[in-house]
Amino acid sequence: MKTVGIIGGSGYTGGELLRILINHPEVDIRAVTSREHAGEPIFKLHPQLRKLTDLKFIEPDVEKISSSCEFVFLALPHGASAPVAKRLLESGVRVIDLSADFRLKNKDDYPKWYGWEHPCPELLEVAVFGLPEFHREEIRNAKLVANPGCIATASILSVAPAIKAGMVDGNRVVLDAKIGSSGAGANVSEASHHPEHSNIVRAYKPVMHRHTAEIEQELSLKAGGEKVTVALTPHAVDMVRGIMVTGHSFLRREVTMQELWRAYRELYQNEPFVRIVRDQKGLHQLPDPKNVVGSNFCDVGFELDPHAKRLVTFGAIDNLLKGAAGQAVQNFNLMIGVDERTGIKFAGVRPI
Amino acid sequence: MKTVGIIGGSGYTGGELLRILINHPEVDIRAVTSREHAGEPIFKLHPQLRKLTDLKFIEPDVEKISSSCEFVFLALPHGASAPVAKRLLESGVRVIDLSADFRLKNKDDYPKWYGWEHPCPELLEVAVFGLPEFHREEIRNAKLVANPGCIATASILSVAPAIKAGMVDGNRVVLDAKIGSSGAGANVSEASHHPEHSNIVRAYKPVMHRHTAEIEQELSLKAGGEKVTVALTPHAVDMVRGIMVTGHSFLRREVTMQELWRAYRELYQNEPFVRIVRDQKGLHQLPDPKNVVGSNFCDVGFELDPHAKRLVTFGAIDNLLKGAAGQAVQNFNLMIGVDERTGIKFAGVRPI
Amino acid sequence: MKTVGIIGGSGYTGGELLRILINHPEVDIRAVTSREHAGEPIFKLHPQLRKLTDLKFIEPDVEKISSSCEFVFLALPHGASAPVAKRLLESGVRVIDLSADFRLKNKDDYPKWYGWEHPCPELLEVAVFGLPEFHREEIRNAKLVANPGCIATASILSVAPAIKAGMVDGNRVVLDAKIGSSGAGANVSEASHHPEHSNIVRAYKPVMHRHTAEIEQELSLKAGGEKVTVALTPHAVDMVRGIMVTGHSFLRREVTMQELWRAYRELYQNEPFVRIVRDQKGLHQLPDPKNVVGSNFCDVGFELDPHAKRLVTFGAIDNLLKGAAGQAVQNFNLMIGVDERTGIKFAGVRPI
Amino acid sequence: MKTVGIIGGSGYTGGELLRILINHPEVDIRAVTSREHAGEPIFKLHPQLRKLTDLKFIEPDVEKISSSCEFVFLALPHGASAPVAKRLLESGVRVIDLSADFRLKNKDDYPKWYGWEHPCPELLEVAVFGLPEFHREEIRNAKLVANPGCIATASILSVAPAIKAGMVDGNRVVLDAKIGSSGAGANVSEASHHPEHSNIVRAYKPVMHRHTAEIEQELSLKAGGEKVTVALTPHAVDMVRGIMVTGHSFLRREVTMQELWRAYRELYQNEPFVRIVRDQKGLHQLPDPKNVVGSNFCDVGFELDPHAKRLVTFGAIDNLLKGAAGQAVQNFNLMIGVDERTGIKFAGVRPI
């Protein structure tokens, strides 16, 4: 039983963390913060939790939380997380940070992709990129885990096997992402206004999207050091949850379906939360966010295009689970040394 | 540990039963039938279960199932269930039937509302109406539980306290229901074609809907024998899951908000799966299917209309859970004597 | 050719007015105002109009507009409209007001339903309730037309024939409305945030909704002076456009289907924008907002419930057209003496 | 005034053709066929047309239609169209064919992409590819116009200027398409079942999609004979109407934004139905199907990716209008020598 805090509990990621952690057998939730809603029962904001918990939001007092919690999940905006993480680490708290503040290894990438100098670059070496499939052992002992971005998770997992096997041209990896509205968080905006967000396919940040940096960092590791260049374009579509990343890359050489299966099985055969989906018949031949929503799974799949000498890859996740809260708990499970699936074994809810 | 079978496992209710039962600590699933898909892994049809179970569909051989299962969930079409239930009961199997075949106590109601004579009317006395909130003790010992209809569950639970307290005119209970497309099942039709089902508010069976019979049966019990007459009109709306039943009834006398709270608390205070929702501020002041989808909760609420001397009631459920598979497992838990919440304690998935 | 202005052109109603008026053969648009967007081309805000008009928003200078326009459409918030209308009328401009400020005949209804005293009650007598089906002759000569509310339009048109024929109990007319998100306008709010507005059935103002007043006013006229009492509850559902009002009223006497047809035909047979929909087969047996979206039609229908002695009525409109901009142009056409259908003859866009 | 027939009037394209043609000032509709619905009023199937036309479906008797119609729109399935077109042409009827049967110039492409030998290859030379922006003069005199595919229209128009200007590598043009459910037509299937089609991002025909052939044919023409290779992957998303094609191509040389504007303006500046959308601020900076739905516009846009040396292009259309019926009428207008915009000048319906 570990004492746990959530700093930034009012958003959608906070809601999903709570949904998971109130039923987690190894967790004793000691603090859930929200500056705006301090004092209110959390079910007032997260109505799905009514009758399941009596927890209330408290003020985000880092000192207090440090003294009562062994682990803290940070669900704060990009840029706001780093200073809080630093103080928590200094008090000996182990931190799972859901922002982008510790994902990049190279401190120069922050001004380039985020527009600000990193306030505590020394921690970038301490932080572990929290993708269990590729950094499991480091995560077990990490003090600070940088939970990957949602688009990044689906991108990296779906493309990595082909990159690792040297099948495709690493200079031209196109990633065309489709993402639900919850990915932009709980804050209202003109773009998220229901009449403006329904029936859309709206590209945003069509070039130079920030997740590019972490995707290239991780894929380059898989490429054995060769620099991978990613061409990412996300689109908001009319759904609340889910991400699909369609990858288009170009074959370096003749590749067979058998080789592809082998490459994907090699990496994911024993992974509890990655499923290879490429069936020959039926409605569910390839990954679709619909089939993972509500779960921590990442479904990956692939297809060969003999005409254009292209490999098409697919990665589908629930952006709030494998793309945020679920993966955070998967990391937490590794850090405390229990079965990685503890508390997040549930299937997706389908149809929805 | 009980041996359990599911007859009719290929539909949406079957999928939800499987999602729950594969994680249920007291259940050993021995049979999942599908005539059409016998031999196929169930995850081919229910892709959310991939990597969570290796079960395959088998042929619906009632003899075999009788000999290997202590309990059977029947998820068959109305009319098809009765003869199968009869054979299972004769073999000593305890049955939870999700069809309408045993919900009505009065055999004459079958020709009236369903258009056919009941093939085994003697079983109508044996069957228990599977609404735990109102028939908990009978369910514990039942051989045959008739799981209520989805619209009926939300209707009965939301209106019953006002009826029981004698607050409203039982002759004119209007129930205006809004329901998602999964309520019509997995079989395709012109009405369920996506271009025809999107952006609709389409009344169907606007009068004489079959669920009227079971709603009147149960509300009349609560009315102390007085016959309650229900005016039900369901509408298909553009969502996949969820039911909202808005009740409009007319006050027999002056009623205060305090009396209403008392009437609802009296019936539901200790109920694990009914939540009274009537807040004064925030976005979640009244029940909304959005807040229960993915869970076994029924949210109920109410409002007084001083202008029209009306009581407005609200009942929201997930039609596949509290309206079908979840409630079936809740009944099963009662039948085997474990905590009613076993295996169905999960919160809704929100936002979705 | 008439000179026309739109005051309040940045919202959804303004967008629809523009879409219609730029193609209207009798209209010369002289002014489209938006305080916030003055100077910008209107297609920046209404991107559907790109390449169709070069008009720009201007500041809302009432004097200037009075001197250049014979007709003004007012698309301002409730309460803000009355003083502007007054000044326009004084300058001899004829006004079509899309707010609620002149819909009610009884000045005491404003404090009761809207919470404020009417600033120019003398104009309430001047104003004509802009429902062409029931006030056509007065509209032709009106100086000031009060365009009806969207829920009100669908409610009044669908129930009026039964009220006029004395078929139903006027004390207990239940109106259960379902409405798309555009009905709440272009301003963002927590309630309109896409993740919070998707997959909902959310009652708002479930009692004492403001449209009650104008519905009762108009239905009472049809009842020959007898006061009609309406019990209205609107629900936000997951669509952008469209309203469905389901009416539940109780029969005063035995009524046949033939009588119903006669009552509806009598009022609507010659109406260009009301269609009676009650077919015996096919998918489109009753009104559905899906079938009117994009058009100025109001589809009305009915069904008899022999069990509960109830009449169920249905009224479906596009809330931005027959519920706002379309009806406003229909009124304008009457005021200028051209064919009522000029510029608004288009069919709905289906499927959508 | 021309006499016109529609063969295959019961589908969604037929519905949109009818919506346009009943208001077209130069059209006298003489025949609308539907084998299944012959004898029924067309508004029974296309309820948006109720009260707008009394036309009835008739049997598809080609002889009769030939003798009464100067022009015929063919909205038949791929493969079924060719023999009918042949007979109509022999009778002197001018034909606008909405199937794929005459789109490809090279008869060998039919076995390759469609799997059958073309039954009348001699007509492939007679047929004109009905994209007015690129074949306007040939269309004016055509006997047989092959209306382009919906994905093809958005693809060709959005990428052509960059290809023509030689800016991008023609061997690696990735086209990632997102398409609404109406694109698959009015016939029901498991894939179109509402619970299975909601909240999806489902790739279908992710490689070797048939539209590849006509896109390559037309882009190669623009490339001055150089063969362009297209890598197309369409995805079904949760909307009814609209297509977005995101193009990812790789720059052959340094390209400036000014050059891009010039290239696009050169081709589309005077086009009535193509709009270049690339704004610097606001919500509508790039094409989005939401902004064209209900209209015949194709919105095109572009963005430069300095990081990956990529050009991102966007093409958005209403698949049933510029992608089918609207473009067919645009072609018809050219064939009869009237203003190309006749009958299809309407703006999109927004928001929806």
Image: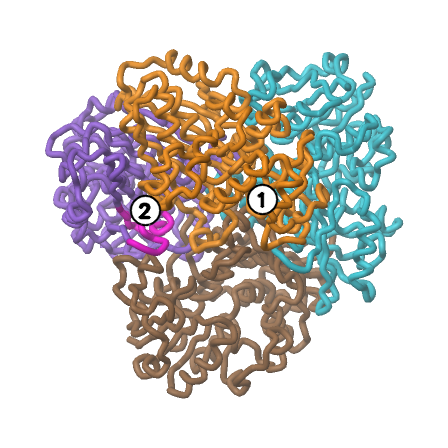
Chain colours: A brown, B purple, C orange, D cyan
Mark 2 residue type: Leu
Q: Main secondary structure of the magenta part?
A: loop
Mark 1 residue type: Ile
- Considering every residue shown, the one lying at the far right of the view is D224
Q: Residues within 10 Å of mark 2 (few under 14, many from 20)?
A: many
Segment tinted magenta in the rendering: B280-301
Mark 2 belongs to which subunit? B
Q: Is residue A219 left or right of residue B63?
A: right
Residue nearest the viewer, comparing B338 with B200? B200
- Examine the structure image and report whether residue B284 is included in the region drawn in magenta: yes
Is A248 situated above or below A213? above
Circle 1 is placed at which residue position? Answer: C7
Circle 2 is placed at which residue position? Answer: B321
Residue nearest the viewer, comparing C149 with C249? C149
Q: Look at 54% across and 76% down and name the residue there.
A: A103
Which quarter of the picture shows residue C254?
A: top left
